[in-house]
Each structure stands twice: as structure tokens, then as C-alpha cells.
Amino acid sequence: MNNQPIKVLIVDDSAVIRGLLAKALVRDAEIEVVGTAMHGDAALSWLKDRPADVVILDVEMPVMDGLETLKQLRQQHPDIRVIMASSLTSSGAKTSMIALSLGADACIAKPTAGSASEAMQTVAGELIPLVKGLCGRGLARPSPPPPAVANAFLPTVRKKDSIAPPKLLVIGSSTGGPNALNRVLTDLGRDFKIPTLIVQHMPPMFTGMMARHLQSDVGRPVKEAEAGEKLQQGVTYVAPGDFHMQLEENSDGMSLSLNQDPVEHYCRPSVNPLFRSAARLAGPRTLAVMLTGMGSDGFEGTRDIVAQGGYVLAQDEASSVVWGMPGSIVNAGMAHEVLPLQEIGSRIINLCSTATSRARMECS
């Protein structure tokens, strides 16, 4: 076990934000704020002589902005983890998506309202586990299930020779998720018809921006989900920030429901409501994928999918930014297959086409 504290450099042109982030982080004994800088050029100069494990990087700064600094960091210090901090605005969300595509490991939204103590509590609650997760501490390791779940029967599942033709593709992701989602959806191709539903842990505005970026990259409809809309073939739906997304069955098919029920696993949206509703409505015709992410959100929902005969793919540890969510279901024996990111899209296509062909043969 590494007993050395995680060294963090904070880069922001606001002294108030630098102070807030520093005070929030030092609440945890495993984290040390080793320096601060007002802009990217100063941060790069600082890093010439001193090490850091994580850089928290503002987007908008004088002299050298966050995106240019990120490019330099990736060239000069490829092993440093980079967390982008942006405003909770459409512009901030757009820049964050660009930063993720340029190699940022994660993005957070700066606090927008409330007292200083509330802001610090919010920042600490999000930033501390993220910093530790990215550095292989705390929640980066597969989180144990809650005691009630640990004592329950956990089915051990194995790879199947055949599955029922999938009616739904449901995907859960968190830290590292936007880039992983981009790869999977791109690999599925423009003609993939099965309705696809995604829960990615992100704040409001960020999820909508991510959906637009994904649609541009994959070349087929990707949209932020709206309450009450009917599922359409060939469309990918992203849960909006701060809303759980689940499925409902109507006389004319399935539709989407959004709510602000209590958080699950500290998250809203949580993977669990989506996965549970998919298990209930699609049963064995649910194909679920768990991608990179911290913690164990989706654990209970995956258990329901497996219990109803659905099929589960999990991203492997080597290709995950953080192997928390996929690791928790793998360690519980709930994944039928564990695959590197670059193989997940093609495996989904193979499973869907094989199942459909087999079903047609049985009906002929």
C-alpha cells in the first residue's frame, strides 16, 4: 500500500477558488496540496522542478488557458492525472467536453451558490473521492457491496453460447466514461438499431453537451432524454444531469420517465433506476454494459438484470480509467464477459446479430 500522500497542484486565476479547493482537499489526510498557480504557464514552470500526481485545472485563465495547458501537460507530463474545473454553464460544459477529448481524466463543475461552508462541503464530497480514485486509492478499488447485498445470494454467471435477441442496450459509466462511450458508440456504427440508454455521472448541462458531441462523432441520433418520450429504434438516450432515468411500459411500447428521487450511491442520475427498470420490463432481452467509473453504482441494478436472465458485459481493469463500477460487478460474479474497451462495441454487434439470426432460424 502506498503511504505517501497524493500530491495535488491547483491551477486557477481566482484566489478564492484556489483557497476553496485547497481547504476542501486537505480535509483528507491522504491528500497534500503541494502548490498553486494562477495560470497554465506558471503551472508548467512549477512542474519543471517539483512533482505532482494530480493537477486541478481551471478552464478560463490569462496568459495560458486550461485547454492549452492541458495539451502541454499531456506532452510533458503524460502520467499526471488532470481534472478540469469549469463553470456550470453551456460554455463551460462545451469546453469540458473538448478537454476530455484532449486527454483530461475528469471534469468537475465549480460551485455556483450557497455559503462558503456549503460550497466547501460540496467540493470536498466530489473532489476528494475523484482525486483518490484517479490515483488508485479509496473508491478506485472495486467497492464492496452494501452489507445487505453482501449477505444475499449473488449469482455466478458464465459466458453464454446464445442469448435472447436484445430489446434494449443499457450502459452505465462515470469517471472516464465520455471517451469510453464515444469509442463504444462509434464502434457500433451508424446502423445500430437497438434503443440505447446511457447513465453517465455528470451535472446538468454537461450531459446535454455530451449527447451533442456523441451524436456528432457517431453519426446517428444521440439526445438528452425527455420525460414521457417513446423509445425509438436507432436512438441513443442520455440521462439528464440531476435526474434519474427509468423505463415505463405503455400500450404502444416503452417510454422514458425522469425523476429526482433520492440519490443512490451518492449519484443522480444513478445507474440503478435504469438497470432495475430494464430488468423488469425487458428481462432476458436486456443487454447491459458497465464501463469505467468510481464506486459501485449500478451494482444492485446489474444483479436484477442477471436474475431476470439478461446479459452483462464489463470493461476490463486495464482499459478503465477507474475500475470501480465494472470491478464491483466482476468481483461479485455478475459479468458474463470482461472485455477491453476496444472490443466491447464489436462484441455487442456480434451478440445482437447472432441472437437475431438464431431467433429467425427457430421461427422458420
Image (tube, grey):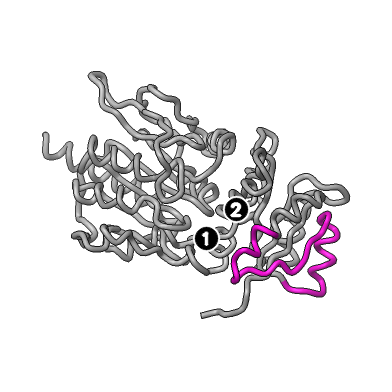
Determine whether label 1 and label 2 are within 8 Å by CB.
Answer: yes
The circle on residue 229 is none
- To which residue does mark 1 refer? 321
Q: Judge from the rendering whether residue 102 lies leftward or rightward of residue 201; answer left or right.
A: right
The residue that label 2 is drawn on is: 106
Is residue 48 on the magenta stretch? Answer: yes
Please give the name of the residue rendered at 23% of the width and 44% of the height, measured from the top-left corner.
355
User: Residue at (54%, 60%) from the top-left corner?
Assistant: 129
280 lies left or right of 25: left
Q: Quadrant of residue 82?
A: bottom right
259, above or below 110, in the image: above
* Residue 215 on the magenta segment: no
- The residue stretch that appears in magenta: 23-51
- From the top left corner, tell me how far across and down residue 175 is, in percent: 52, 54
Q: Position of residue 135 (x, y in %)?
A: 57, 67
Residue 134 location (% of width, % of height): 56, 63
Asked if one can make out residue 94 in the rendered structure from this viewpoint, the answer is: no
**Label 1 sits on what residue type?**
Val
Q: Nearer the viewer, residue 70 or 301?
A: 301
Question: What's the CA distance linking mark 1 and mark 2?
Answer: 9 Å
Q: Residue furthest top?
A: 252
Seen in the image, is 215 located left or right of residue 58?
Answer: left
> Disc 2 marks which amino acid?
Ala
Tell me the residue at 30%/45% (across/down): 287
Camera sees residue 116: yes
Residue placed at 49% from the left, 46% from the top?
181
What is the secondary structure assignment of the residue under circle 2?
strand
- SS at circle 1: loop
Q: From the viewer's perspective, is residue 170 above or below residue 343?
A: above
Task: Pick the residue in front: 94 or 357.
Answer: 94
Question: Looking at the image, is mark 1 or mark 2 nearer the viewer?
Answer: 2
**Residue 70 image offset from top left, x and y in percent:** 73, 55
